[in-house]
Amino acid sequence: MDLIIKIVAIGVITSIATLIVKPIRNDFAIMIALSGGVIILIMLLGYLTNIFDSFKLIIDSTGISSSLYTLVLKIIGIGYLIEFSAGICSDSGNGSLADKILLGGKIVIMVMALPIITNILKIISQLLPK
């Protein structure tokens, strides 16, 4: 709970600073927003290690191929990266570019998810009576 309060505080302070600086120096406002985002991401690194440790435990206990979990983690990472990048573009006034980044990310995620979808469909077809 303590971390989320810090994250919210940094987000609000960054937003206020950006609003104050934007009319004076738009380029500095973008840098302030980027810096706030990076600080928040750095604060979350500890939680990322917890996530990876949990996935390792799941991999070890289930016996399912670790490549499947790796693929899922990559897809999740791409989703977060795309959302963060599109947010930066939107904040800097490039909403159209942000939309293109989101579209590209969705397509990449869909392509990466195809092996998972194929495996699920194979399992379902094996369970159905013939």
Image (spheres, helix red, strand yellow):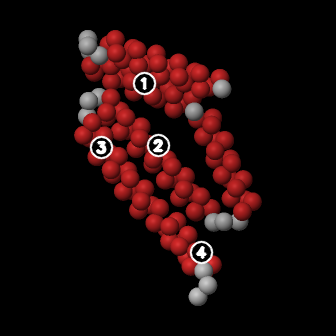
SS for dot 3: helix
Numbered disc total: 4
Q: Nearer the viewer, residue 8 or 27?
A: 8
- Mark 4 or mark 2, earlier in chain: 2
SS for dot 1: helix
Q: Residue 38 placed where, x, y %?
A: 46, 29
- For badge 1, the amino acid type reads Ser
SS for dot 2: helix
The reply to whether the C-beta atoms of the residues labelled 3 and 1 are less than 8 Å apart is no
Q: Is residue 55 left or right of residue 40?
A: right
Q: Nearer the viewer, residue 31 or 10?
A: 10
- Mark 3 or mark 1, earlier in chain: 1
Determine crowd level at label 4: few under 14, some 14-19, many 20+ residues with C-alpha closer than 10 A: few
SS for dot 4: helix
Reply above or below: 37 against 29.
below
Mark number for residue 99? Answer: 3
- Disc 3 versus disc 1: nearer the observer: 3
Reply above or below: 85 against 110.
above
Report which residue position mark 4 lands on.
Answer: 123
Residue 34 in which image quadrant: top left
Q: Is residue 73 left or right of residue 93?
A: right
Q: Is residue 33 left or right of residue 48?
A: left
- Mark 4 or mark 3, earlier in chain: 3
Report which residue position mark 2 lands on.
Answer: 80
